[in-house]
């Protein structure tokens, strides 16, 4: 299985064997980053407005975990057990505890002082 998200606010769970859409979820904002756990039961979705959701893939229930980084800054998400890792253009990697709705750990990616060229995002 694979999960994707896009400008239209749709997240799609794909069956890779035949490239069919198994499920879709709608959000009211551009989907910036998405990750699904290994067994395909839980997903984490980051939106342009900075909101991060967890999604129960079986029931479709969506829960706001928190708002993080700055608006439009979340570029990477990862589910690690019960924790959610985020990365953004603010030079930080953050580890969140959704159950406690709190930041567990924050790391600075680099201490370089050069600025990103305009129009260039993470990984470009």
Image (cartoon, helix red, strand yellow):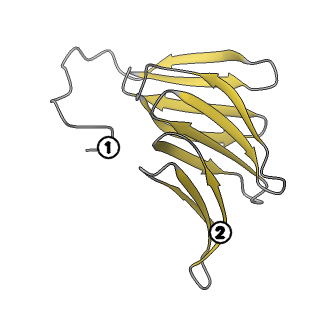
Residue position for label 1 = 123
**103 left or right of 34 in image:** right
Q: Looking at the rendered structure, which numbered label has been put on residue 34? A: none
Q: Residue lying furthest front in this view?
A: 28
Residue 49: image location, x then y, percent:
47, 28
Q: Residue at x 22, y 14 (%)?
A: 113
Quadrant of residue 105 in the image? top right
Residue 35: image location, x then y, percent:
60, 49
Number of residue marks = 2
Q: Secondary structure at mark 2?
A: loop
Alpha carbon separation for disc pair 1 and 2? 24 Å
Depth check, mark 1 against mark 2: the one in front is: 2
**10 left or right of 64 in image:** left
Residue 68: image location, x then y, percent:
54, 21
Q: Residue lying furthest left in this view?
A: 117
**105 left or right of 88 in image:** right
Near-viewer residue (96 or 4): 4
Q: Residue at x 36, y 26 (%)?
A: 89
Residue 122: image location, x then y, percent:
33, 38
Tell me, yes or no, whether the two marked residues, 1 and 2, touch with CB atoms within 8 Å: no
Near-viewer residue (61 or 112): 61
Q: Residue lying furthest bottom in this view?
A: 18
Mark 1 or 2 closer to N-term?
2
Q: Residue at x 66, y 16 (%)?
A: 103
Q: Residue at x 83, y 57 (%)?
A: 58
Residue position for label 2 = 1
Quadrant for the N terminus, please: bottom right
Q: 10 Å neighbourhood of mark 1: few (<14), some, or many (≥20)?
A: few
Quadrant for the C terminus, please: top left
Q: Secondary structure at mark 1?
A: loop
Q: 10 Å neighbourhood of mark 2: few (<14), some, or many (≥20)?
A: some
């Amino acid at each position: 299985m694979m999960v994707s998200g896009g400008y239209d606010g749709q997240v799609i769970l794909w069956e890779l064997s035949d490239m069919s859409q198994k499920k879709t979820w709608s959000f009211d904002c551009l989907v910036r980053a998405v990750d699904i756990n290994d067994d395909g039961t839980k997903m984490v979705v980051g939106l342009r407005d900075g909101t991060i959701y967890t999604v129960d893939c079986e029931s479709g229930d969506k829960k706001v975990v928190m708002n993080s980084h700055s608006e439009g800054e979340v570029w990477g998400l990862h589910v690690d057990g019960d924790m959610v890792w985020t990365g953004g253009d603010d030079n930080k990697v953050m580890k969140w505890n959704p159950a406690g709705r709190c930041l567990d750990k924050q790391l600075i990616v680099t201490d370089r002082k050069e600025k990103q060229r305009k129009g260039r995002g993470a990984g470009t």
